[in-house]
Structure formats: structure tokens, C-alpha cells
Image: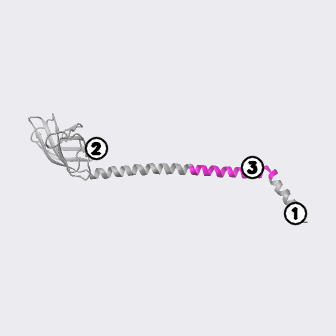
Amino acid sequence: MYFRVDRMRRLRFLALFEARRAVSAVISNVILIAAVIVVGFAALAFTQSTSNTYVTQYGSSVRSSSEQLAESLAFEYAYYNGTAKSLWVYIVNCGKINAVSLTAAYVANATWTNSTFTIALNWLNGTSISSNHLDMGQEGYFVWPAIVLPQGNSYTLKITTRRGSSFEYQLAT
């Protein structure tokens, strides 16, 4: 009896290898599981690289915004010389960050706007600031030549910095 049961088990076991349908179902399931795992790892790698990019961009944006918030320029004085047709603007960096560079200046009233993108900063003694930026506590001025501002009008003077901050001053001629 024992011999017969053992032989039957062997025959069933060998029948599994001869039955191609059972083996092909197992192989197809293994291939399907492997494909799902590969796609899962690909999705994981993509999301990780995307999140790293977002973290880097967010950190850069926060740093830029905090630097912009730390910028503070004060207008000490603005003088329009009607004879020479030039505007003299004296400023001081009273913020908490160094290297404040001016990128543009605008003068406007209710009916027109004039702008310049060439700003050469000078020290108060008249020498040129070679780096063309002001560090914390430093004072300087720039001259806007060849600008006509009719007397008796009110103007808004606006300057923008490299970091994107803008500062305004009301000027009466």
C-alpha cells in the first residue's frame, strides 16, 4: 500500500511538469509580478527626482525672498538741477543685507513716465563706486543726466534693485 501511494505522488508530481498550462500560468504570473515591481521602482525614482527638484526650487525661492525682504534703501535727498537738466538722488542702504545693486530708476507723474537702466553709483566724495552696489550702512548717489522735469510739479521717483525690491520717493520741483 505504501508503495502505491508513493508511486501515485510521483506520478502527480511528474504530471505537473508535463502539463504545460500549469507551468505557463506560473511563469506568466512571475513575469507580471516582475513587471509591476519594475514599474513601481521607476515611479518611485521619478517622484524622488521630481521632489528633489521642487525642494531645490523652493529653497532658492525662499532664500531670494528673504534677501529681498532684508533689502531696505532710504532716500536721503533728491535734487533736480533745472539748469543742468539733471536729477541727483542720494540713497543709503539701511537694510540687513550687503551688495544692493540698482537696476532701474523711474520718474513719473500723472501724465508721463521716464526711465533709465544705466545707474552709476558714486560715493559722497564724488568718486565712482567700482562695484556699483551699496553694502549695509553705506551711502551713495547717482546722477540722472538729460532729464527735463518742469518746475512746480510733483513726481514719484522709483528705484528697483537686482533682487526685485522697489523703493519710492516723492519729489517736488
Give the residue drawn at x 16%, y 47%: 170
Q: Amino acid at mark 3?
A: Ser
Q: Secondary structure at mark 2?
A: loop
Whether residue 35 is in magenta: the answer is yes
Magenta stretch: dominant SS?
helix
State the mark number for residue 5: 1
State the mark number for residue 162: 2
Along the viewing direction, whichever of 113 and 48 lies nearer the viewer: 48
Q: Earlier in the sequence, mark 3 or mark 2?
A: 3
Would you say the residues marked 1 and 3 are in contact, meaning their CB atoms lie under 8 Å apart?
Answer: no
Residue 132 in the image: state x and y as whole percent: 23, 41
Q: CA distance from mark 2 to mark 1?
A: 90 Å
Q: CA distance from mark 3 to mark 2?
A: 67 Å
Task: Classify 117 as above or below 19.
Answer: above
Q: How many marks?
A: 3
Dot 1, crowdedness within 10 Å: few (<14), some or many (≥20)? few
Q: Earlier in the sequence, mark 2 or mark 1?
A: 1
State the mark number for residue 41: none
Dot 3, crowdedness within 10 Å: few (<14), some or many (≥20)? few
Residue 62 in the image: state x and y as whole percent: 35, 52
Q: Amino acid at mark 2?
A: Arg
Would you say the residues marked 3 and 2 are in contact, meaning their CB atoms lie under 8 Å apart?
Answer: no
Whether residue 88 is in magenta: the answer is no
Q: Amino acid at mark 1?
A: Val
Residue 169 in the image: state x and y as whole percent: 17, 47
Q: CA distance from mark 1 to mark 3?
A: 28 Å
Q: Secondary structure at mark 3?
A: helix
The stretch of residues the image draws in magenta is 17-41
Give the residue drawn at x 85%, y 56%: 11
Task: Give the quarter of the image for residue 130.
Answer: top left
